[in-house]
Structure formats: structure tokens, C-alpha cells
Image (cartoon, rainbow, N blue to C red):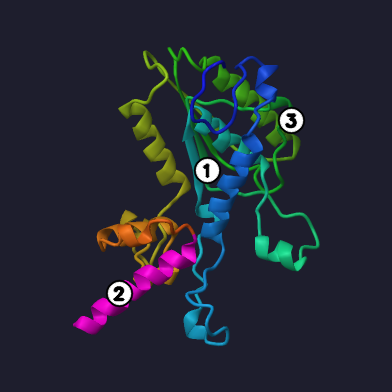
């Protein structure tokens, strides 16, 4: 819109015609899909011995336990990516084992804060995502993205969802006096939504919300976020600089834990 700044994609304007352009949106969606896939695919602890079952991990997070959430342009990206894109499986693509198109992401939910639906005319729900619950929060005095964007987005998404027989719920919450920002009331609504779409993982008869947090001791079974948290707590941030591959992070933390165990 005439200003140079970091962004997920180029914004020419927020009118319906300009909103169809969104140069850079596809590249940003690829980045998000890569992050989701990284969490969804099992990770091997070591490639040294392919026959050693002890070096393998089947740990992964199912797409149905993932939520995409963003503010403003990030919310627009979360909405469009979460509803239109399909699951990416690079290993299967490389081996040419896919006999049919991959299914939609089928996420646990999507949260849009002060955002909107980009590329409205091109929007089409991917099979498998038609029942994805959506929470759209917006300030009623937003001078950047008018609050009317909530209803326009809901109408377009709901129409596409119903067209494929889906029952996804597009919930809109507006906040009087709130501009292009967030409020505690809004964050409380988001927290309630997350608790609803990501119920605790039960362990026997226990129903405590503590069960929603998976306790992992083996780095090979950790998510990237858990790995980076563990690395930070272990004071290994300098050694982790420049590491972007999950396997590198697994090896770094595994070696640290092994060294500590040997010193005991």
C-alpha cells in the first residue's frame, strides 16, 4: 500500500480487486506448510544404522492437533492456508508413491485476529478441511482492516464450506472500542477456543488439563519448539545458531543429555 515493511505478502490495497493479487502469498504458504510438515512427519534420531530400531522415532503431531493463528496479515495467511492447502509429504513425492492428491490439512482450528480472507474469488476449501472450526476476532474501531471484513470473510468461507457439504463453524467476535490491536477480552476468547478445539489428551481416567501437555524426555520425540526450549534451558543456544534442520537439534540435545548422564 505504498509503504515498504516486512510482510507475509505484498498488499496493494484492501478493496476487493486489490485483495485478489497478494504477490508472495504462495511463497509464505509454502513456508507455513513446511513447518507443519516438519511437526507431522516422524523423525529419525540417527541415520547411521538404518536397521537399528532403537535409533528410530515414530513421534509426530497429527494435523488434527495443530492450530494456525495470526494477527492482521498473519491472520489472513492462517485462514487461507489452513482452509485451502493440502498436506505435503515430501518423502512420498520424491518416491512417487502418491496415487491420489493429498487431502486438506484438517487442522484442529484456525484463529484470525484483525485479519481477513485474501484472494476471496479464488478461495476453495480443500477436501478434509470443510469441518475446521474458525474463530475470527476483530476490533470494531479498526482503522486498518475495517470490521466489515469479518462478515465478508465469514460469508465467503461458509459458502464454500457448505458447497462441499461441510459443517465447519466460522465464529466471529467483535470488541467495541478496540482498534487494530488485541485486548485481554480477546485473548481470553482465544484461550477458550483453543481449549475447546484442543481437548486434553486423556490418560486413563484422568481428565486434568495437565494431560494436554505431553511430557517428553527423548529429544527424538520432541517438537521443534520443545527442542529449542530444551536447548535454551541447557544453555546451548550458541551451539544451536545456524541450525534449522530438526535432526541437528535432536542430535545436539541428545548429546548434551548423554554427556550429563555420563558425568553423574
What residue would you read off at disc 1? 109
Left or right: residue 125 versus residue 257 is right
Q: How many marks?
A: 3
**Residue 57: x, y in percent?**
50, 74
Residue 15 is one of the magenta-drawn residues: no
- Position of the C terminus, as image quadrant, is bottom left
Mark 1 surroundings: few (<14), some (14-19) or many (≥20) residues within 10 A: many
Q: Which residue does the image show at 33% across and 54% down from the upper left?
A: 209
Front residue of 239 and 232: 239
Instruction: Look at mark 3 in the image and give the residue it sits on.
Output: 122
Q: Report the residue at 33% width, 27% height from top.
A: 185
SS for dot 1: strand
Q: Nearer the viewer, residue 105 or 27?
A: 27
Of the numbered discs 3 and 2, the one sitting upstream in the chain is 3
Q: Is residue 83 above or below residue 241?
A: above
Asked if marks 3 and 1 touch (Cβ < 8 Å), the reply is no
Instruction: Work out whether residue 208 or residue 28 is closer to the camera in this orientation and state it.
Output: 28
Q: Quadrant of residue 49?
A: bottom right
Q: Secondary structure at mark 2?
A: helix
Quarter assignment of residue 169:
top right
Q: Identify whether 37 is placed above or below 57.
A: above
Which residue has dot 2 on it? 257
Q: CA distance from mark 3 to mark 2?
A: 49 Å
Magenta span of residues: 245-264
Place of residue 182 in the rendered image (x, y in percent of width and height, measured from the top left): 37, 26
Q: Residue furthest left?
A: 264
Query: Which mark's residue is nearer the viewer, 3 or 2?
Result: 2
Is residue 56 shown to the viewer in this render?
Answer: yes
Upstream in sequence: badge 3 or badge 1: 1
- Look at the numbered discs 1 and 2 and tell me whether their residues touch, using CB distance below 8 Å: no
Amino acid at each position: 500500500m505504498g509503504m515498504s515493511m516486512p510482510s507475509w505478502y505484498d498488499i496493494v490495497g484492501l478493496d476487493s480487486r486489490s485483495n485478489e493479487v497478494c504477490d508472495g502469498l504462495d511463497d509464505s504458504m509454502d513456508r507455513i506448510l513446511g513447518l507443519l510438515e516438519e511437526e507431522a512427519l516422524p523423525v529419525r534420531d540417527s541415520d547411521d544404522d538404518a536397521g537399528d530400531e532403537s535409533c528410530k522415532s515414530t513421534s509426530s503431531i497429527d494435523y488434527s492437533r495443530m492450530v494456525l493463528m495470526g494477527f492482521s496479515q498473519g491472520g489472513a495467511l492462517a485462514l487461507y492456508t489452513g482452509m485451502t492447502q493440502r498436506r505435503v509429504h515430501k518423502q512420498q513425492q520424491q518416491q512417487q508413491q502418491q496415487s491420489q492428491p493429498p487431502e486438506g490439512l484438517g487442522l484442529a482450528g484456525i484463529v484470525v485476529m484483525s485479519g481477513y480472507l485474501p484472494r476471496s474469488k479464488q478461495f476453495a476449501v480443500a477436501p478434509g478441511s470443510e469441518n475446521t472450526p474458525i474463530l475470527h476476532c476483530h476490533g470494531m474501531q479498526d482503522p486498518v482492516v475495517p470490521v466489515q471484513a469479518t462478515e465478508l470473510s465469514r460469508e465467503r468461507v461458509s459458502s464454500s464450506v457448505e458447497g462441499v457439504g461441510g459443517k465447519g463453524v466460522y465464529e466471529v467476535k467483535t470488541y467495541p472500542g478496540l482498534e487494530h490491536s488485541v485486548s485481554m477480552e480477546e485473548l481470553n476468547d482465544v484461550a477458550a477456543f483453543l481449549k475447546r478445539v484442543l481437548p486434553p489428551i486423556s490418560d486413563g481416567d484422568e481428565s486434568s488439563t495437565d494431560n494436554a501437555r505431553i511430557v517428553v524426555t527423548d529429544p527424538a520425540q520432541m517438537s521443534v519448539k520443545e527442542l529449542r526450549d530444551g536447548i535454551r534451558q541447557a544453555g546451548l543456544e550458541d551451539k544451536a545458531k545456524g541450525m534449522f534442520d530438526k535432526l541437528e537439534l535432536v542430535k545436539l540435545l541428545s548429546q548434551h543429555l548423554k554427556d550429563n548422564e555420563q558425568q553423574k
